[in-house]
Image (cartoon, rainbow, N blue to C red):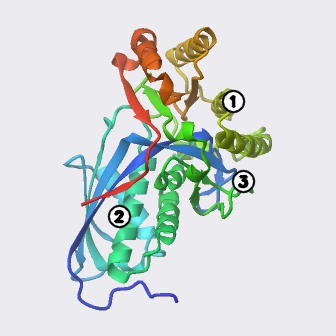
């Protein structure tokens, strides 16, 4: 039964809050087409401590207009540039959420990590907002009672805001993009992968080593665009598919050595693609390389199954099993933190996914 998602009766004002985490891609999404559709499937761990908390207050609008009615505050302050981006996103969402223009919206958002920490916040921010919008739809129309319908719509809306955000909806791990590896995988939304994980990955640790906290040199959107005429584009998309199939199985069996090899290969391919794009970009800093070398040396000398991955930036994610926590924390504090910006790093881990906050 399809329900017309427009309001035609009195509604009570409402308030909804979601806390949604960032995620770290193990198989990277790099290259998109059409309306935010990926060129290859990607797989990520959902994190815990790096999150965005977003509250949306809504009430019936006196006079519906073409533009959404929005007031926005980021970390308690007005932020014109974020507000404009959010408004443009919400205006487009009238397709999926026609009632959005009938409401007055006030949005308050904050991150658990400093805005200038060089951590991509689009995944946590867009997923938190998407979850709030789905809760509002359900409160008004009762259309998303079923958990998997709710998650699928939230993931779709999050993807339309930022591709990687589609994956933050699920606990532990998620896959976004068509693949035969899991049933129901789609380019339109991510699907959960946590149910397939070997136990050791459900408590995996991610130390985010902040090498540089300046805003990104190249936005993700610009980066994805560079793939359009990239000489290695097709080879890359094939590689990503091959890596995903293998990593998916490795994550079921818990083969940490192969896990480490595949995850590092993905990070290096992403950066190699950026270096030989036109124009080319070097997103690593000298201290990024130093940290990578030290991680490899640590793995060799201690046999601890640690590995690194990178976003499209200079910061390093050090991934390792919980059982190695004491050893790895000492390694970070004594050896790696001197190469971090002001010694900064974030102690994060795989987690349960978004939560609705009362
Ligand atoms: C390198 O999701 O930030 O982190 O869809 O343009 O918002 P947009 O891009 P975004 O790209 C993320 C790229 C990446 C890899 C990944 O997370 O899969």
Residue 107 picture location, percent across and down:
27, 60
**In the rendered structure, which disc, 3 or 2, sits on the residue that comes first in sequence?**
2
Q: Residues within 10 Å of mark 2 (few under 14, many from 20)?
A: many
- Label 3 vs label 1: CA separation? 20 Å
Residue 61 picture location, percent across and down:
24, 79
Residue 351, which numbered label?
A: none
Up/down of 80 relative to 307, above or below:
below
Residue found 19% across the figure and 48% down from its top: 76
- Label 3 vs label 2: CA separation? 30 Å
Q: Quarter holding the C terminus?
A: bottom left
Residue 132, which numbered label?
A: 2
**In the rendered structure, which disc, 3 or 1, sits on the residue that comes first in sequence?**
3
Confirm if mark 1 falls within 8 A of ligand 1: no
* Front residue of this view, candidates 262 and 163: 262
Residue 265, which numbered label?
A: 1
Q: At numbered mark 2, what does the secondary structure look like: helix, strand or loop?
A: helix
Q: At numbered mark 1, what does the secondary structure look like: helix, strand or loop?
A: helix
Mark 3 lies on residue:
181
Residue found 55% across the figure and 35% down from its top: 312
Q: Comparing marks 3 and 2, which lies closer to the viewer?
A: 3
**In the rendered structure, which disc, 1 or 2, sits on the residue that comes first in sequence?**
2
Q: Are marks 3 and 2 in contact (CB under 8 Å)?
A: no
Q: Quadrant of ligand 1?
A: top right
Residue found 60% across the figure and 8% down from its top: 301
């Amino acid at each position: 039964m399809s329900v017309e998602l427009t309001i035609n009766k009195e509604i009570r004002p409402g308030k909804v809050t979601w806390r949604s985490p960032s995620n770290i891609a193990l198989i990277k999404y790099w290259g998109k087409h059409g309306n935010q559709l990926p060129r290859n499937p990607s797989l990520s761990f959902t994190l815990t401590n790096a999150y965005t908390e977003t509250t949306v207050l809504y009430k019936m609008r006196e006079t519906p207009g073409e533009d959404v009615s929005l007031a926005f505050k980021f970390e308690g302050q007005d932020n014109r540039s974020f507000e404009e981006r959010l408004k443009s996103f919400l205006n487009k969402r009238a397709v999926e959420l026609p009632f959005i223009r009938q409401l007055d919206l006030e949005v308050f958002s904050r991150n658990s990590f400093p805005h200038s920490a060089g951590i991509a916040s689009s995944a946590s921010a867009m997923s938190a907002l998407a979850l709030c919008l789905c809760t509002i739809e359900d409160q008004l129309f009762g259309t998303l009672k079923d958990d998997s319908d709710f998650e699928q719509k939230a993931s779709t809306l999050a993807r339309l805001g930022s591709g990687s955000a589609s994956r933050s909806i699920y606990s532990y791990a998620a896959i976004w993009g068509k693949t035969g590896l899991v049933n129901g995988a789609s380019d339109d939304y991510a699907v959960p992968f946590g149910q397939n994980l070997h136990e050791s990955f459900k408590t995996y640790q991610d130390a985010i080593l902040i090498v540089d906290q300046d805003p990104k040199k190249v936005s993700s959107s610009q980066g994805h665009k560079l793939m359009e005429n990239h000489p290695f584009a097709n080879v890359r998309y094939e590689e990503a598919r091959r890596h995903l199939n293998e990593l998916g199985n490795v994550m079921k069996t818990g083969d940490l050595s192969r896990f480490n090899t595949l995850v590092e290969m993905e990070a290096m391919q992403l950066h190699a693609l950026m270096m030989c794009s036109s124009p080319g970009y070097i997103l690593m800093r000298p201290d990024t390389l130093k940290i990578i070398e030290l991680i490899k040396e640590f793995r060799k000398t201690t046999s601890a199954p640690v590995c690194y991955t990178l976003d499209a930036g200079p910061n390093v994610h050090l991934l390792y099993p919980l059982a190695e926590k004491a050893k790895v924390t000492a390694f970070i504090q004594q050896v790696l933190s001197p190469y971090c910006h002001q010694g900064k790093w974030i102690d994060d881990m795989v987690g349960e996914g978004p939560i609705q906050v009362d």
